[in-house]
Image (cartoon, rainbow, N blue to C red):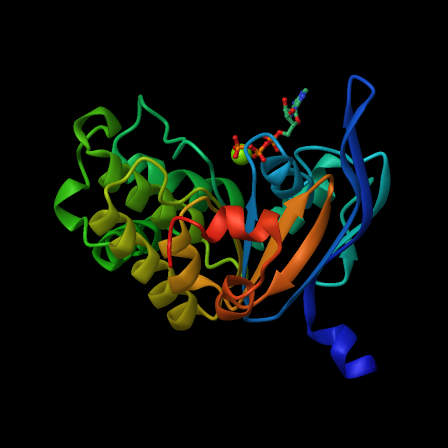
Amino acid sequence: MESDARDILIDVRDVWKSFNGQAVLRGVSLQVRAGASEVILGRSGIGKSVLLKSIVGLLVPEAGSIRVKGEEVVGLGPRQLNRIRRNIGYVFQYAALYDSMTVRENLEFPLRKLTDLPEDEIARRVEEQLRLVDLAEAIDRMPSELSGGMRKRVGLARAIITRPAIVLYDEPTAGLDPMTAHDISDLMVDLARRFGITSITVTHDLQCAHIVADRISILEGGVFTHQGTYEELRKLEDPLVRAFFQAVT
Ligand SMILES: Nc1ncnc2c1ncn2[C@@H]1O[C@H](COP(=O)(O)OP(=O)(O)OP(=O)(O)O)[C@@H](O)[C@H]1O
Ligand SMILES: [Mg+2]
């Protein structure tokens, strides 16, 4: 239906991506509706980060189509890609902050690169964003002076500071204790509601998946083999699905 098609903000169709002759993504498809929170589960090395990087054009698939807000990403040049990336916040797997910059400078960076906001608005936005993630006091610290959980929160703040419609989270809670991971997951839900964000979250953390997911998709063998809500997947007897849910009952 036409109205349905317009609702799809991220539309991945039959995407193939190989490295050294080895196909990682093998005709993968995924449709994410506007406002939805999609979670991707999958074994280590199966291609989850490759898929996220393909959506923002950091990797180029050999075949298939990736549409973001209706616009084809595959085959775009650098300038057009930059325009698309303005709509997408990316929280990298290892909370990749710029280590030689303060927290304030880390947050200013995307605003300077992607917008032409005046200086006073940049300063205001950085302070507001840090308050949102409860880190106002860390504004002049260096990343090396922050705990892992604080670094993750700065990474989140930096990814959404340009108010992107879409946020891609790669392992937002990895390496955190369960309580801090819970806080980060709650923060993701809070930010999504506040700013109407559509998101894809790659995680191994079932608690995070439970908190943030509208739907979970399981990547295996280069395609999504299972899709459903947390409760739907939790009930499945399939051994692959069980393997992910085994840790929780
Ligand atoms: N730039 C690259 N060059 C060559 N091979 C790559 C590249 N990026 C990823 N790969 C390979 O693609 C496969 C999938 O990698 P990917 O990083 O997507 O895994 P993942 O599912 O995110 O795993 P993890 O859960 O450990 O982060 C791996 O075999 C990896 O070595
Ligand atoms: Mg990864």
49 relative to 110 in the view: left or right = right
Would residue 98 be seen by someone viewing this image from the given angle?
yes
Please give left or right for residue 123 compared with residue 222 in the image.
left
Above or below: residue 112 compared with residue 40: above
Taking 103 as reference, is 70 left or right? Answer: right
Front-lying residue, 116 or 85? 85
Q: Quadrant of the C terminus?
A: bottom left
Q: Is residue 146 above or below residue 230?
A: above
**Residue 3 location in percent, x, y?**
76, 82
Q: Nearer the viewer, residue 197 or 30?
A: 30
Q: Residue at x 42, y 66 (%)?
A: 192
Residue 160 placement (x, y as % from top left): 42, 53
- Residue 89 in view in this figure: no
Tally of numbered tags: 0
Q: In the displayed orientation, state which residue is furthest to the left.
A: 137
Give the camera-side residue of 197 and 24.
24
User: Ligand 1 quadrant?
Assistant: top right
Residue placed at 21% from the left, 57% from the top?
Answer: 131
**The quarter of the displayed image where residue 194 is located:** bottom left
Where is residue 234? Give x, y as percent. Answer: 50, 63
Q: Residue at x 64, y 36 (%)?
A: 47
| Image quarter hosting the N terminus | bottom right
Closer to the camera, 25 or 12?
Answer: 25
- Percent of width and height locating residue 43: 56, 37
Most distant residue in the top direction:
20
Residue plotted at (46% across, 35% down): 93
**Residue 111 placement, left or right of 123:** right
